[in-house]
Amino acid sequence: MGEIVRYKRDVWGEEVILGVSWDLLYVVFMAIVILLIAHAIIMAALAKKNLDRPTGDGRRVVRHESIDRLFHWLMAASILVLIFTGVAPILGLRVAWLDIHWISGLLLTFLVVAHIIRASFWQDFKSMLLMPKDFAEPFDSSRKPGKYYFEQKGMHWAVTVVALAVIVTGVLMFMQIDSPFWDRTNSMAEDQLGLVFLLHGLSTLALVALAATHIYFALRPEKIFYTRSMISGWMSEDEMAANHDTAKWSPKEAE
Amino acid sequence: MVATSHDVMPDIELYQPADEATALDLASRLGNEGWLLGGGQDTYGWLKDRNKTPAAMIELTQIDAWKGIKEISDGIEIGAVTTLTEIANNPLVQSRYGVLAKAASVVASPQIRNVGTLGGNLNQDARCWYYRRGLDCYRAGGNICYADSPEGLNREHALFGASRCVAVSPSDTAPALVALDATMVVSSSSGERLIPAQDFFVGPDRDILNMTVLNDDEILTAVRIPSTWANAEFYWEKVADRNVWDFALVNIAAVFKVSGGTIEDSRFACGAVECTPRRLETVESEVRGQQRSEELAVRAGEIATDGARALNYNNFKIPLMQNLVKRAIRG
């Protein structure tokens, strides 16, 4: 049985946390692969019952503004780079990963802060709020959501929590290394540092799981028009009518 | 685990292969559980302190094919388990590659050179005492560098290339081989690869757990030195706290092709200032085609330490390195 937390002896001989056990990376990876394969099999078995998919033809409505799409793809790129550069040394790859890692981390931090400000003051923040009544949505096919459906909101808030945890712990770790902005002090107490490493590791594992799940659903045939809308900005009125309640979400027509 | 000294070795399997194939097969089969043993000077301390706990040792000194110095079509080849004394005293090395003979002659002490091998000297682990003490620092898989903490003792540590870990390359022969543009012959059961000496060593930015690019199943079997720098003028100097049985505070190996007082070409490498031997390419560019002079030596010395970042207690290494470069150019 593998461990979850790794411990070490500090300079005084006391046992302190060292970080997360990276055996969990393989556990998370295998669990996600199995779950997604199982989902794919179930969806394939049910696919015959769902042949009447909405078409992308016809009039179009705006789903994502270009600035939001830019934010999304930059965030996606920075998260993927962070995951790769963070995991590479654990897998034994000899790459100079650290500078790329913190630069991507700073980019993600900037994007997240900018997104929070924009979402709070210039976007319809309420459209992403997960309300108690939303929890009935997956079990009631007659209920259609507004701009975002239950699973999208859930994914968004899960990624938000995990990304903020990665960022906060990442900034604390960043302060322990040299950067163009400061010379490291390397002075955090070992037990506190271990806790930061543990939280960063756990949130990294969660981010790996969420990123894999997000990419999987983005590529699902019945969801691919959402991915297209994140690239081109629009969805068809047919797709909108089939999946969303126009009383709750009334976007402007796309050019 | 913090080190606890023991008088005796731990229980450990000892393999003493007498031929290359068996050794390579053992290295492949045992992977990171198999500890390669040359003269043992970087081994027994680790094992007696229980800070490294391999399941087995593979002693390589029985393999005649990996011993000795021989001429090859373009230079010489030195077997990796050739002792440092043999290298220091070998007439071929002394006459053609004096910088290496000199470097080998000042490693540690006569007793250590009599059993210590070239492969062992090149592959030895970092000598940072926090790491050697068994603390869980970055190099040991932990999350902190004790040497670069506010109260850390880092007089012997790095000026360049620190990436979390600030340990330095402790080898005396490594800078000489980098200066001579040597090639490392690395063998495994799946074949052989040739690696320029400069690329053989790896810094903590790329691999914080290891100091060379050797994989678990690979063995450094020989070093080939090309004739390019044979009989070249050379300069070697090692500065340490004492003349015998000590690691360098800074060492320098330089080779020159000089004609009429003009340096036509050169190669410089410094040890103990970075986790890898530091090639001084900017110095080489600066002195190329120049007449030897005091001004040139001063200028090259200053260039040599561009980008150096001293730690709390090793600022002295900057003027030390500058002066060694100056002395090398003065000849």
Image: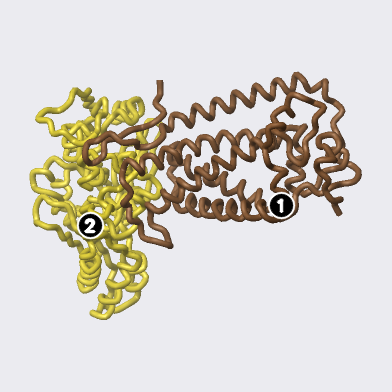
Q: Which chain is yellow?
A: B
Residue at left 50%, top 54%? Answer: A103
Question: Residue B96 in the image: x percent, y percent?
Answer: 22, 58
Q: Which residue lies at the image location 23% right of the left edge and 52% below the top edge?
A: B152
Q: In the image, which disc is placed on residue B97?
A: 2
Residue A191 to residue B8: above or below = below
Residue that protrudes farthest toward the right in the picture: A58
- B247 to the left or right of B209: left
In the picture of the structure, the residue carrying the numbered disc 1 is A123
- The picture places residue A124, in percent across and down from the top left corner, at 73, 49
Question: In the image, B194: left or right of A125?
Answer: left
Asked if B288 appears above or below B169 in the picture, the reply is below
Q: What element carries label 1?
A: loop
Tell me if mark 1 has few (under 14), some (14-19) or many (20+) residues whose alpha carbon lies within 10 angstroms of its own: some
Disc nearest the viewer among 1 and 2: 1
* Pointer 2 local density, CA inside 10 Å: few below 14, some 14–19, many at least 20: many
- Amino acid type of the residue tagged 2 in the rendering: Tyr
Q: Which of A7 and A29 is in front in this view?
A: A7
Examine the image and state in which quarter residue B221 appears: top left
- Label 2 resides on the chain identified as B
Q: How many badges with numbers are in the image? A: 2
**Which residue shows up at 81% across the image and 37% down it?**
A244
In which image quadrant can residue A118 be found? bottom right
Q: Is mark 2 on a helix, strand or loop?
A: loop
Percent x, y of residue A147: 76, 41
Report in which chain the residue with disc 1 lies: A
Image position of B74 with respect to B290: above or below: above
Question: Drawn colour of chain A?
Answer: brown
Q: Is residue A89 visible?
A: yes
